Image (tube, helix red, strand yellow):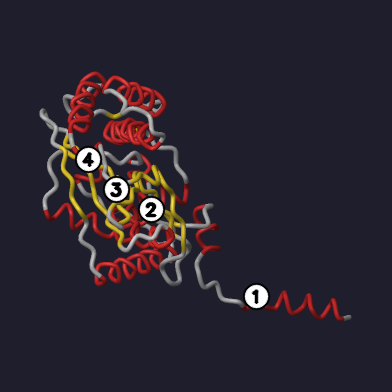
Amino acid sequence: MIAGTSLAAKDRNKCVRPEIDGTQTALRLTGRDYISCSSITTFQRCPLKYYFQYVVGLVPEFVPSSLIFGTAIHAAVESHFRALLEGACAPSVHDLMEAYQQTWKEESSSPVQFGKGESAESLTDLARRMLEAFLKSDTSRPEGEIVGIEEEFRARIVEDCPPLLGRVDLIFCARAALHLVDFKTARNRWNEAKTEEGLPQMALYAELARPLATALGCRTVRPEWIIVTKTQQPVVQAVSAQLGPSQIARTRSVVRQVWRAITTEVFYPTPSAMQCATCPFQTACRTWEAGP
Ligand code: SF4
């Protein structure tokens, strides 16, 4: 009798307890019990692309060369910092190119869509020049102590949202500050507008990494980008992300609103020349029709 009463109470709780953190909704919609910082950006750029990628899980029609190229350069840079973390000698450009080639091979199993005038060979040449420039720059020798590479953070930092997941390329401690480095490849040097565009993601990384900073005795968190340009003579640019309390508050509000929008399940295309040219769901998009 007592057991029956307790079961009934449990069932009643199940029915009436409101879902406050969105985890169940995230699981139902995407099969994941979290949202990633990059999925938020994808939704902001095109809700239909978000739907194809995260809700339906469509297999991409192709992989843009820029995506594989960025991933392969990241792998090369990661191998460099990993060697430093392990106390080994800094790898040569030849070693980094091996990591680049290996990743290129692994990532290009789907058809690759090259840009105008590009080929796997021309990108290999470009990668070598970029990695040479990186190795010559101060950014390849961070001061202080490396404490993480490709570090994943996951925490509930926005009210009413599922936990957020972010991955930081390089983390090091120097002068009582925890440095979070996001490595980028870009057509050109970043200007102020480009930096502004990247601030929300950095604000989330900074919030996610704050407990680590405290645990390591760091007084501040310093997010920054290392950008290597895909130009004839690549330039390595280090840019620090200037985050104030208002930026963090605004980013939390944006994430909350984006998550609310996702949960309404209203997905629609927002065509733009920039986005659509490299979108791997173009055929699905052309034949897509909204339900009743
Ligand atoms: S083709 Fe353009 S509009 Fe269509 S899903 Fe992709 S990005 Fe969105």
At label 3, the amino acid type is Val
At label 1, the amino acid type is Cys
Closer to the chain start, of discs 2 and 3, is: 2
Closer to the chain start, of discs 4 and 1, is: 1
From the image, tell me which residue sits under label 1.
15
* Residue 268 visible, this orientation: no
Q: Nearer the viewer, mark 2 or mark 4?
A: 4
From the image, tell me which residue sits under label 4.
139
* Quadrant (top left/top right/bottom left/bottom right) for the C terminus: bottom left
| Residue in the image at 41% along x and 26% along y | 106
* Residue 9 visible, this orientation: yes
Do residues under tags 1 and 2 come within 8 Å of each other at their CB atoms?
no
From the image, tell me which residue sits under label 2.
39
| Residue in the image at 53% along x and 52% along y | 31
Percent position (x, y) of residue 198?
Answer: 24, 54
Closer to the chain start, of discs 1 and 3, is: 1
Closer to the chain start, of discs 4 and 3, is: 4
- 49, 141: nearer the viewer: 141
- How far is the residue under mark 2 from the one under mark 3? 20 Å
Farthest residue, direction right: 1
Give the crowd class for mark 3: few <14, some 14-19, many >=20 residues within 10 Å: many
At label 4, the amino acid type is Thr
Say whether mark 1 is within 8 Å of ligand 1.
Answer: no
Q: Nearer the viewer, mark 4 or mark 3?
A: 4
